[in-house]
Amino acid sequence: MITQIDKYTLFCDYYYEWIRIYKEGAIRNVTLKKYHTALTWLKKLIPNLKLGEMNRVIYQKLLNEYALVHERQTTMDFHHLLKGSILDAVDDGHILSDPTRKVIIKGKAPRKKKPKYLSQFELQTLLSCLDLGEEINWDWLLLLIAKTGLRFSEALGLTPKDFDFSSQTLNINKTWAYKEGGGFHQTKNLSSNRRIQIDWQLVMQFAELTRYLPEQKPIFVNGNVYNSTVNDHLARRCREAGVPVISIHGLRHTHASILLFSGVSIASVARRLGHASITTTQKTYLHIIRELNNQDIDIIMRAVTNLH
């Protein structure tokens, strides 16, 4: 622990102390780990830099070195993880002026991206290949996420009590902390606490599947659960179905994209997904929204052309 921070304090030590004071206990552990990962890179790239020596040139060089082995978006995230601490140091007088002003974000050429979502036909083909037996398995989890758009941790946190079969709704009010060894955890944000409609087929299927399961225990958890295990299982199912290989999170994207292409409003999709803001939905599905806008233009042109 640093007793006093001044311009001669090592920047790495200052950043560690800043995380401890302002971030620990205020953010989720998953996010906190990102700050500590940024600290690891600072120790590697500027281990001996003093706080008062930080300026625009040094900060730009720091980002440039980081960008040599990271894509542009990752470099942007690194910048955002550092910026708050630097602005606080400026406010406290340890750094003379804002070194993050007019920063230029660089990065490696992005890798070829895997498909993020399936078309409705591809999803239907995938679902037809699932082994949906009389007992809970990973295929039931895939079906549930495909039909609800739940986050992986939200689906793992479901218990039989969360299903309200009479009103055909599903209550999402917690997650399963699979990255931290298990246990129930709060949802990502307040908007993630939500109640969503489910179709009658899902109602009938899960009413039977959960009939004799303990009400308060997670349906899909039996020991340690790893994201990679379920992603590998999904990849095998995708290959068996002859569709592009996507991730578990890709099933959530698939759910949202099908709703948007079906004409569901962005606001309704945002609520169903548990996004904190409709802006998040717009940014995430910008490519789909643009495609829908182009379709709207075609419809508008056909409509006005018929006017005489």
Image (tube, rainbow, N blue to C red):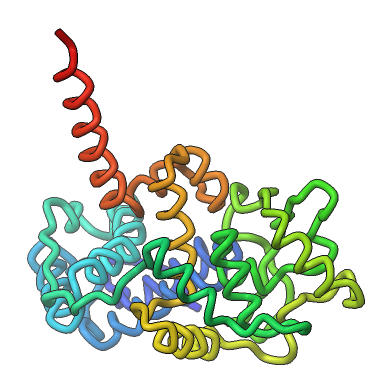
Residue 249 percent location from the top left of the image? 46, 70
Residue at 19 percent of width and 74 percent of height: 71
Considering the image in quadrants, where does the C terminus appear?
A: top left
Q: Is residue 254 left or right of residue 77?
A: right
Vertical side of 101 occupied by 43: above or below:
below
Residue 57 percent location from the top left of the image? 7, 66
Vertical side of 266 occupied by 106: above or below:
below
User: 55 or 4: which is nearer to us?
Assistant: 55
Residue at 35 percent of width and 57 percent of height: 84
Vertical side of 209 occupied by 173: above or below:
above
Image mark count: 0
Residue 282 percent location from the top left of the image? 36, 45
User: 146 or 268: which is nearer to us?
Assistant: 146
Residue 122 appears in which quarter of the rendering?
A: bottom left
Q: Is residue 24 left or right of residue 119?
A: right
User: 6 or 214: which is nearer to us?
Assistant: 214
Q: Is residue 56 left or right of residue 205?
A: left
Residue 121 percent location from the top left of the image? 40, 65
Q: Is residue 59 left or right of residue 148?
A: left
User: 179 or 22: which is nearer to us?
Assistant: 179
Residue at 24 percent of width and 44 percent of height: 290
Residue at 83 percent of width and 66 percent of height: 207
Q: Residue furthest top?
A: 308
